[in-house]
Every structure is written in C-alpha cells, then in structure tokens.
Image (cartoon, rainbow, N blue to C red):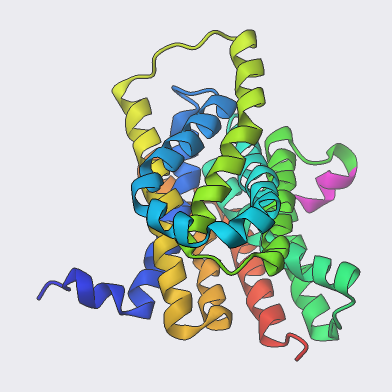
C-alpha cells in the first residue's frame, strides 16, 4: 500500500532518509555536471535559480521576518557566501580530479571538523573516546584518498581532487559551526538569504571562469543535472531535514547525515559505474564508524 505524502511528511524516518539520499546524489550530479558545466558557472546558476524558485514561497515569511532580517542580514549573507558557495564551488571543482565515491566518503569528515572547532574555539571538553573516533575518521579518509596505501601520503601527499574536497569540507564545517548565530526567522527566509549570499559570492568566480573559457550551451543532460541540484539537494533535502529536526530533535536527526557517504557511494556505483573497491569500504567504515563512536561518547 503506497505511503500518502501527508503521512510521509509526518514520519521522521522517511524525511530523514530522503534528505541524505538527495545530498548523496549531489556528488553524482556534480560528476555528471563536469561533462557539460564549468564548476563555478554551475554553482552560480544553481543558487540564482534557487532564489527565483523560492521567492514566491518565501515572500510572506520575508515580510514577517523583515525586522529581524534587517538587523541580522549580514550573518545570513556570510553563511551563504562562505558556507554554501565556497563548499559547492570547491566540490564541483574537485570532481574534475577525483571520483564521486571519494567525494562522498570525504564529506563525512565534516562532523569531525565541527567537533574540532568546538574544542579549539569554544573550549568544549573532548573525551578520550571522542579522540579515538576522530582518529578513526581521519584514517578512513586517508585510506580512501590514497587508494588503500596511506603511507603514500608522506611521500606524495593527496591528489588534487581529494585535497580540494577536504578544503570544501572545512568551509561547510565552518558554516555549520556558524549556525549557532542563526537568527530566529522562518526556515524559508533563512534559506532564501543563504541563496542570495551564495549567488553573490559565486558570481565573480563565474565571470572569471567565463573569461578563461567561453560559455557553451549545455546539453539536455546538463540541464537535467541542473534541475536536480536546484530542486532536490538544495530545496527538498532542506525541507525534509528541517521537518525531521522538528519531529525528533537535532541531536537524533544529525545522526542521519552519516547516510550521505553511504548513499553517495552507492549511487556513484549504480549511476556512474565507478568501482567500489575494498579500500573504499574500509575507509567508509572507519569514517562513519568513527563519527558515530565520537558522537556516542560526546561530552555532556
């Protein structure tokens, strides 16, 4: 018997699986996008189209939140500019040099980066078991990025794509860390302002890119990829995740983000035909297991 949309929207587990499923698909879409789009151009157009798509739905909430937004617009703008824009710019760029499987697994480092930022900047206590979990996460990424030969890191370093993706994760972790200063506005107002910040930040990158290589009209595949990244990872996933947090709380909902590298890797194999090797499985288990271990023993 099919699940009715209304009942599905009230089921925390359904919406919290939908969100990481589409986020995981973003790495696959990004890899496909390299065939038709330049990385900075797809980022700017993606966020511009998001502002257009959201405006009719966000308009009434923007009016209600106007007083708060007038005081806090800069915070929201910076979150979009340095979090969403730079993360996506670098992620799409990295996919020109590495696989979607690698990018999916490396995204799982973000919770570890957030935990580290809380420790360094806010002096939040870190337990020994948390450190063990974070070290497991780091080892998993190293095994993934060096194709199962972590000792090569000390001889050759990381390849360009994996290094760029890890830098992208730093920006998204910083965005997540900055959410503690998010003003009390409706989530549609918040997402629209985030999209404005991301569009503005990515615009000069796109203009520079178009100077280096003139724009050529993408194929139907390219526009299909664009439609996917605008609708599903950008809008639908945000709605689903926000609903999941509303239903069961942020702490429990946050654990579902660990599904992103799993879904991303699976989709990369099924859609792109990428090889999922033993070192990918080892890295994935160490990363996801390490994060869950660290969260399980988080300091109260």
Name the spot of residue 65 as percent of width and height, x first: 52, 61
Magenta span: predominant SS is: helix
Using the image as rendered, state which of residue 118 and residue 105 is in the foreground: 118
Locate residue 91 relative to residue 121 in the image: left or right: left
Using the image as rendered, state which of residue 105 and residue 244 is in the foreground: 244
Name the spot of residue 44 as percent of width and height, x first: 54, 31
The question of residue 163 being in magenta is answered with no
Locate residue 269 relative to residue 136 in the image: left or right: left
Q: Which residues are magenta?
A: 149-154
Q: Residue at x 51, y 77 (%)?
A: 253
Name the spot of residue 130 as percent of width and height, x first: 78, 80
Query: Residue 92 falls in which quadrant of the image?
Result: top right
Quarter of the image that includes the N terminus? bottom left
Name the spot of residue 264 as percent of width and height, x first: 48, 53
Using the image as rendered, state which of residue 164 and residue 262 is in the foreground: 164
- Tell me: residue 223, above or below residue 154: above
């Amino acid at each position: 018997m099919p699940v009715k949309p209304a009942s599905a929207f009230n089921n925390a587990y359904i919406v919290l699986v939908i969100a990481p499923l589409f986020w995981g698909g973003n790495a696959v879409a990004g890899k496909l996008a390299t065939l038709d789009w330049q990385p900075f151009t797809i980022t700017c157009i993606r966020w511009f189209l998001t502002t257009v798509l959201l405006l009719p739905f966000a308009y009434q909430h923007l009016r209600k939140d106007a007083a708060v937004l007038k005081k806090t617009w800069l915070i929201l703008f910076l979150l979009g500019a340095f979090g969403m824009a730079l993360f996506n710019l670098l992620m799409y760029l990295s996919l020109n040099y590495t696989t979607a499987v690698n990018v999916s697994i490396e995204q799982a480092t973000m919770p570890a980066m957030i935990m580290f930022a809380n420790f360094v900047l806010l002096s939040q206590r870190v337990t020994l078991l948390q450190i063990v979990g974070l070290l497991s996460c780091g080892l998993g990424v190293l095994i993934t990025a060096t194709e199962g030969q972590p000792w090569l890191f000390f001889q050759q370093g990381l390849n360009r794509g994996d290094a760029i993706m890890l830098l992208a994760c730093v920006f998204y972790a910083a965005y997540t860390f900055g959410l503690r200063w998010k003003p009390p506005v409706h989530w549609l107002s918040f997402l629209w302002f985030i999209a404005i910040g991301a569009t503005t930040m990515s615009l000069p990158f796109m203009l520079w890119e178009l100077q280096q290589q003139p724009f050529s009209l993408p194929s139907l595949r390219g526009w299909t990829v664009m439609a996917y990244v605008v609708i599903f990872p950008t809008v639908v996933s945000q709605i689903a995740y926000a609903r999941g947090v509303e239903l069961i709380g942020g702490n429990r909902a946050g654990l579902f983000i660990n599904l992103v590298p799993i879904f991303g890797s699976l989709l990369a194999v099924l859609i792109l035909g990428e090889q999922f090797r033993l070192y990918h499985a080892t890295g994935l288990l160490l990363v996801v297991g390490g994060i869950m271990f660290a969260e399980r023993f988080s300091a109260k």
